[in-house]
């Protein structure tokens, strides 16, 4: 009995050790991150970007600040009505992680992108096509962490729209396969969080919209948020897992301690108070003064990463605002207005500060 108990205890200890890379305990986070919380980090990095307006970039170079090359980071899904975190599907999680309450709230992803210019600048950002290959790393334990299972997805804006807005904001949209006769599209906004092209940090906010009518979204779509850092300015075309042998240490090193030690999914979202008061445009914007945000009848969604999504369906159009806050008194806003389901929403952006 004593021997059996000791063996079981040792087995449990080994199992917990193998689960360590998914641990989000406070002690583990403090060991890997000593420079402050994720919240302060994202605010500090974003402030650096917004304040760096003297470094103007022309032509194709502007695209590579927030897109192009290889990135590694964390991806999580959220309910489009409540903002609640959607767990990683259980069929992707080993039973041992579920048994010990170590199921991850996110997936690790490695992204490869190429951005190719097509035609002339139309006055609403650079006209280009983006092709992205995303390798998602599936949770694993034990010996599996030395040869991780992955899935791979390919996206392209070839039949969609891509706009570079300002120095560090990108808007893209492309159609998805329809559900019967119902149209769908992927709507994504990328905010740069650091000003260095070699190792830039970014946050991607993506919605999968199902169009009930020509310009009306059937229901609040689920939202995917991805926080990533650039690992290379050259795209590897998603080949990192080809032939197997991708291990947990390599993935962790690519993602970096800054992102992995305190996952953004643990951050407390902002609340409705950040929408109050008056705001004015500052810095680089595509509007002369702050437009009125969606008023009565609009819906808001508050998400980790200082993201707020606000939209309103009117009789003639649907307005969608994706906002990324720097603290509570400055925000970057990307607005799309839809009156035709094949349109790209004509995205516009502005930066504004609250007026005390």
Image (cartoon, rainbow, N blue to C red):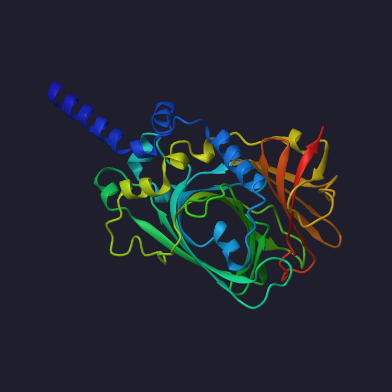
Q: Quadrant of the C terminus?
A: top right
Q: Nearer the viewer, residue 329 or 342?
A: 329
The residue drawn where x is 73% and y is 61% is: 347
Q: Which residue is nearer to you in this view: 157 or 349? A: 349
140 left or right of 169?
A: left
Q: Horizontal and vertical percent for residue 92?
A: 40, 51
Residue at 46% in and 49% down? 73
In the displayed structure image, the side of residue 162 where residue 239 appears, left or right: left
Up the image or down, 278 lies above or below 217; here it is above
- The furthest residue to the top: 2
Tell me where residue 264 appears, x and y as whole percent: 53, 40
Picture coordinates of residue 309 (x, y %)?
A: 70, 47
How many numbered markers are drawn? 0
Q: Is residue 215 visible?
A: yes
Q: Hey, which quadrant is residue 60 in on the image?
A: bottom right
| In the depicted structure, whether residue 104 falls above or below residue 229 | above
Question: Residue 278 sits in which quadrant?
Answer: top right
Residue drawn 61% across the image and 38% down it: 43
Q: In the rendered image, is residue 1 in sight?
A: no
Residue, x 59% and y 38% (percent of image)? 44
Residue 339 image offset from top left, x and y in percent: 80, 66
Q: Is the residue 277 above or below the residue 77 in the image?
A: above
Q: Is residue 212 left or right of residue 103?
A: right
């Amino acid at each position: 009995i004593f021997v059996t108990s000791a063996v079981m205890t040792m087995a449990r200890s080994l199992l917990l050790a193998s689960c360590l890379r998914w641990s989000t305990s406070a002690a583990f986070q403090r060991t890997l991150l000593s420079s402050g919380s994720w919240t302060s980090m994202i605010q500090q990095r974003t402030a650096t970007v917004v304040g760096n307006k003297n470094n103007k970039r022309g032509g194709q170079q502007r695209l590579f600040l927030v897109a192009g090359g290889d990135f590694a980071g964390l991806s999580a899904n959220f309910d489009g009505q409540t903002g609640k975190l959607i767990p990683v599907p259980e069929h992707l999680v080993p039973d041992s992680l579920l048994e010990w309450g170590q199921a991850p709230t996110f997936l690790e992803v490695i992204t490869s992108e190429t951005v190719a210019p097509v035609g002339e600048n139309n006055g609403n950002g650079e006209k280009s096509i983006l092709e992205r290959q995303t390798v998602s790393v599936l949770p694993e334990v034990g010996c599996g962490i030395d040869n991780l299972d992955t899935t791979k997805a390919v996206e392209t804006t070839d039949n969609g729209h891509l706009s570079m807005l300002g120095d560090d904001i990108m808007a893209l949209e492309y159609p998805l396969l329809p559900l019967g006769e119902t149209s769908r599209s992927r709507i994504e906004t990328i905010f740069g969080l650091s000003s260095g092209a070699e190792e830039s940090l970014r946050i991607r906010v993506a919605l999968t919209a199902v169009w009930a009518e020509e310009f009306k979204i059937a229901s609040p779509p689920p939202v995917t948020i991805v926080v990533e850092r650039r690992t290379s300015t050259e795209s590897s075309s998603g080949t990192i897992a080809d032939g197997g042998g991708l291990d947990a240490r390599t993935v962790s090193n690519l993602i970096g301690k800054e992102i992995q030690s305190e996952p953004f999914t643990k951050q407390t979202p902002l609340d409705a108070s950040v929408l109050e008061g008056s705001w004015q445009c500052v810095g680089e914007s595509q509007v002369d003064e702050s437009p009125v945000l969606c008023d009565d009848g609009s819906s808001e969604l508050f998400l980790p990463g200082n993201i707020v999504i606000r939209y309103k369906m009117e009789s003639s159009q649907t307005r969608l605002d994706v906002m990324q806050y720097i603290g509570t008194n400055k925000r970057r806003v990307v607005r799309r207005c839809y009156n035709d389901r094949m349109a790209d929403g004509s995205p516009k952006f502005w930066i504004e500060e609250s007026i005390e």
